[in-house]
Amino acid sequence: MFQIDFNKKIHIHFIGIGGISMSGFAELLHSQGFTISGSDQNESNITTHLESLGINVMYGQCKENITSDIDLIVYTAAISKDNEEFIASVESGIPMMDRAQMVGQVMKNYQRSIAISGTHGKTTTTSMVSHIFLAAQMDPTISVGGILKAINGNLRIGKSENFITEACEYTNSFLKFHPTISIILNIEEDHMDFFHNLDEIRTSFYNFSNLLPENGLLIVNGEIPQYTDITKDTKATVLTYSTVDEGCNYVADQITFDSLGYGSFDLLENGTKVDRIQLSVVGMHNISNALSAIALARSLKIPMEAIKEGLSSFKGTNRRFEYKGEVAGITIIDDYAHHPTEIRATLEAAKKYPNKKVWCVFQPHTYTRTKAFLNDFADALSLADKVVLTDIYAAREIDTGEVSSKDLANLIEEKGKDVYYFPSFDEIENFLLENCVKGDLLITMGAGNVVNIGESLLGI
């Protein structure tokens, strides 16, 4: 495989440069003196930003984009193999690598590369770790899968040897990484369009744990069933954390929630109370996420004051229980949850928020995920007082007619819950305006474009 020499500033071309991760690494390499170009189907705020930096972005993916002066082509996994530009790249003979391979090579360029993995919570935990490092003035380079207000985007370019990034298991992409420290937040069934079963997913995380060197560190959620099967062969030191298992290295004790649903807890380190931790985000799941970030920080001897400051200053990323505004006394929140476990965590957190009723406008994401978890989705969504469903967001898939939002609505209705389905966003917005009342909490939820409903109601 082609190896990037960071002392030799070549021309790298990104197919799909407008993606949240691709754009971040394109900017990172550009800042290090590489010549960067790229293509995307449509103009966006991200591509406009890249162009403002002097990066050449081409709109439309055609063979003419591949020119002889390009030394390396990086492509996103979302690019179809019949894409005209991808075909031209293969035929050109120019070295190619996918995004994950490129990220892995960037990680090799740092002495301390931190990879944060798990089925859920990667973006939030990466952001928490970033806030702690920033509070400790450790000048990290950060790549996060969302917009983090503390760095005004999804990328921060530091000058230290600290590199922080998310590590996603989809298509086993994180197995191409080169971490020195890894976090495993949780392991559940997801991405069933790629994995066949949970055993395959667990095997992927087992292989991920074995990427670490002997002087590495693995931080793992002690509540993962049979987690030792995942960690048993790693060469690295293993630390555990939990909100319930007092036998873990880091434990949250005496957990409470304030009137806004923000959690606080006593931090126990190997059974001894260290300090009281106050968060500025909601839900039990974020207490768990915070524990993993604390375990990392304590292992690096980051001062407790910096840890507390970093966590208290973190108020969430975009699309993670994000407060969008208020209209007619109705509070509107947006959340990226698109897996039953994430939905349950978000709605349980919402129950601790001061409100009359919780309305959830849910947009199922992909047909394969909806079909695989249909009953689980119905169970999780039933935690809301009122559920409104949009059509399924197809993303990369084609509708085969095997599953629809009406199937999900029927299951929720069987559970005795009020559920409504509308085929258009306009119908949903009109329905909400007629039926939500002052004091209600309205959550738009999903990984697609459902956020547009709340923003339309708010006029933003």
Image (tube, rainbow, N blue to C red):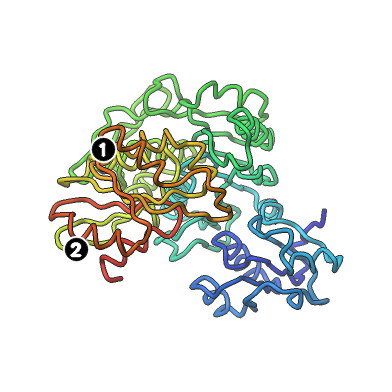
Q: In the rendering, which numbered label is found on residue 327?
A: 2
Q: Which residue is mark 1?
A: 417
**What residue lies at 35% left-to-right and 62% top-to-bottom?**
425
Mark 2: few/some/many CA within 10 Å (<14, 14-19, 20+): some
**What residue lies at 38% left-to-right and 53% top-to-bottom?**
390
Q: Is residue 177 above or below residue 230?
A: below
Residue 272 in the image: state x and y as whole percent.
36, 24
**What residue lies at 45% left-to-right and 56% top-to-bottom?**
448
Judged from this view, the residue extending furthest toward the front is: 401
Where is residue 416, by image quadrant? top left
**Disc 2 secondary structure class:** strand
Give 448 or 119, whichever is nearer the viewer. 448
Q: Please name which of the two marks, 2 or 1, marks the residue nearer to the observer.
A: 1
Q: Tell me, yes or no, whether the two marked residues, 2 and 1, touch with CB atoms within 8 Å.
A: no
Q: In the rendering, which numbered label is found on residue 460?
A: none
Residue 208 falls left or right of residue 3: left
The amino acid beneath tag 2 is Val
Q: Is residue 450 above or below residue 400?
A: below
Q: Is residue 142 above or below residue 367?
A: below
Q: Is residue 321 above or below residue 194?
A: below
